[in-house]
Amino acid sequence: VAPVGRAAVGIVGAGQLARMLCQAAVGLGITPRLLAAVADDSAALVDPDVLLGDPGSLDALRALASTCAVTTFDHELVDPEHLVALEAEGHVLRPGAATAAVVVDKRRQRELIRDLGIVGPIWRALPNDAGEAAAGVRAHGGEHGWPVVLKAARGGYDGRGVRVVAGPSEVDGAVASMGAAPLLVEEGIDIAFEIAVQVVRRPGGEMVVYPVVETVQRDGICVEVVAPAAVEWEVALLAEGAARRLAEAIDLVGLLAVELFVDPHGRVTVNELAVRPHNSAHHTIEACETSQFENHLRAVLDLPLGATTLRAPHAVMVNVLGPPDGSDPADGLARALAVPGAHVHLYAKGAKAGRKLGHVTVCGDDADDVRARARRAAGALVGEG
Amino acid sequence: VAPVGRAAVGIVGAGQLARMLCQAAVGLGITPRLLAAVADDSAALVDPDVLLGDPGSLDALRALASTCAVTTFDHELVDPEHLVALEAEGHVLRPGAATAAVVVDKRRQRELIRDLGIVGPIWRALPNDAGEAAAGVRAHGGEHGWPVVLKAARGGYDGRGVRVVAGPSEVDGAVASMGAAPLLVEEGIDIAFEIAVQVVRRPGGEMVVYPVVETVQRDGICVEVVAPAAVEWEVALLAEGAARRLAEAIDLVGLLAVELFVDPHGRVTVNELAVRPHNSAHHTIEACETSQFENHLRAVLDLPLGATTLRAPHAVMVNVLGPPDGSDPADGLARALAVPGAHVHLYAKGAKAGRKLGHVTVCGDDADDVRARARRAAGALVGEG
């Protein structure tokens, strides 16, 4: 327990991940201190201990970290230099600056994956000069085939900072559209389906792994998660093993989500890493013995981790994205709750087309029935059906 | 959704029940507005929307109710006259003033039970004059046998306001110890074990009932809840049926907990009613498809109710009461979380001997194993083992 005036845990950011961390913190008897950019951000609406400030500013980060026993993060867009500075001042960051520095940079992620002997897409870093970058993209496509995937090394999420390039004629436009960010290019994997696995690790090395899930993406945004993934046991074993190796290699404290591709031949490649609670594990709130949010808190507080076992044979999580007409999913709450077994999570964020505003999870015995109910409830929230 | 500046739901009180209501409200996308007597009360520590004020004061209640679409309660000690006044002013109370008036008064509870043809202990109201009250107690014992149970009609909970009177020689002292409150006396039931059942009801009459649980009491305080209760189906049916009849009779909106005695011959008698989330249903957070807290909120917001099905064959909830040495259960958190499957809930209340400071729930396949683990985790929190 933190001394008076000092929070047990600080959270940089106040989006829906922080909101669900706060919800999990209630049971542990603690009130996280949030660093929120705006007073009505999702988590700030459910937490009385909020510092208003820019998570991009070192001063604001210091104001949080210096009044919290441990500081964690609900996003990865914090400047790694700031994290290094805070640790040098003696503040406890979990995950730490070195971990974040690897994960925030997709090129360093790729190097790590390669160094650990884990299979990832074939990639190359691109020079900063646009002309040279375009030449690199063409060379990559020439060697490994088209399409290729052009990525910003930093700052991308939910499909942003990622562009599929179908052939040589699209290269210049694609490079120009990415702006000045450092870039990399990867082979375009023929994706049969995508899976994800999450591992949680304590400072001492204790680890737990959640059962592998299938993630369904649309336009680069996760729309549905199916637990457990209907994959061969070797695929699950490989994904879990890769996640454990990665967690140890980056000296993880907290939750690491690993997203992987499976191609039509069953080849598994690691796509991306994230060190924070992750959309691919929202189902764990109801579907697993211990939620990803509680386990992330337990890990950063150096408390024993909870079991990750599924509590039902099947679970499906469907994201609630803001409908094109800008209407608010909260208006469909009654219809969604009328769907049997629908666990609705609304984030109390301003409605905006395409924005993640909530999710629905359904657990049960029959995979098809569970999926149908989760979709029906999510559909009710966005005005369908 | 409530208009700007108006909360969707107000809660009178900020104890652990309000705390767990706030936790459940996160998923529904709402932030309850609390009326808290002190700023560091259990729920006020996890909710940014708090009015400070005395829940006993009409002005404070009005300040809450007039800024909330619906107002509900985490305790039953509010003056029923105030509730009548608030409803007359047009504020929406759920449960309403008429419901509360019945339940707050144990004599009216007894009359209702009798009028509905439900079996309760044989009782009589006592005159306010101490000498006449004592005569009434003696007469009751003479007619129905000793011991008898002397009860304050109002304000008792967790064993307060209840006194077992073994024989005629104890009567005068017992009556004197109860103070000036209106009293009643009941036959002393030979209790083999105690059970409880909870029903949740919406304004339109939709109802759901949680599976009957066994409650283990020590010194009038619930220490353990076992779900489901190991009772004959007829006993469960009777308890559930009584709860439904009572809920309809009092025009319940929200959660009603009914506590019942079972005697060695299997005779079931209704002991007491409470219209609020209840200690006998804390296990529902993990053990049931929908928790009592979410269902209470759904009911008062007039939203479809969630399923009450058990998610595991067995669940046991053990209360964490402040140890005699005044130590804080939070100090044992790491040891408690090390117990497999232990779901710990700490209320962040000041440690005090005998005070309810938290609870632990364990779910699983084997009743004995589940109980042993729940006790071990709760024991770790209070410095045992």
Image (tube, coloured by chain):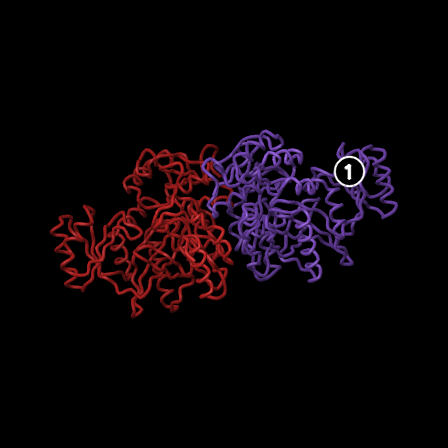
Chain colours: A purple, B red
Q: Chain of mark 1?
A: A
Across and down, in percent, residue A84 comes to 65, 36
Give the vertical position of B179 relative to B219 (above or below).
Answer: above
**Quadrant of the image occupied by residue A369:** bottom right
Mark 1 neighbour density, 10 Å: few (under 14) some (14–19) many (20 or more): many
Q: In this view of the protein, which residue sits in the foreground, B76 or B381?
A: B381
Across and down, in percent, residue B355 comes to 35, 49
**Quadrant of the image occupied by residue B209:** bottom left
**Which residue is under mark 1?**
A183
Left/right placement of residue B58 relative to residue A236 reads left
Give the vertical position of A305 relative to B72 (above or below).
Answer: below
Residue displayed at 74% across by 42% down: A108
**Residue type at mark 1?**
Leu
Instruction: For the C terminus of chain B, give its image quadrant.
Output: bottom left
Left/right placement of residue A42 relative to residue B234 reads right
Across and down, in percent, residue B59 comes to 32, 33
Left/right placement of residue B201 relative to residue A101 reads left
| Residue B24 appears in view | no
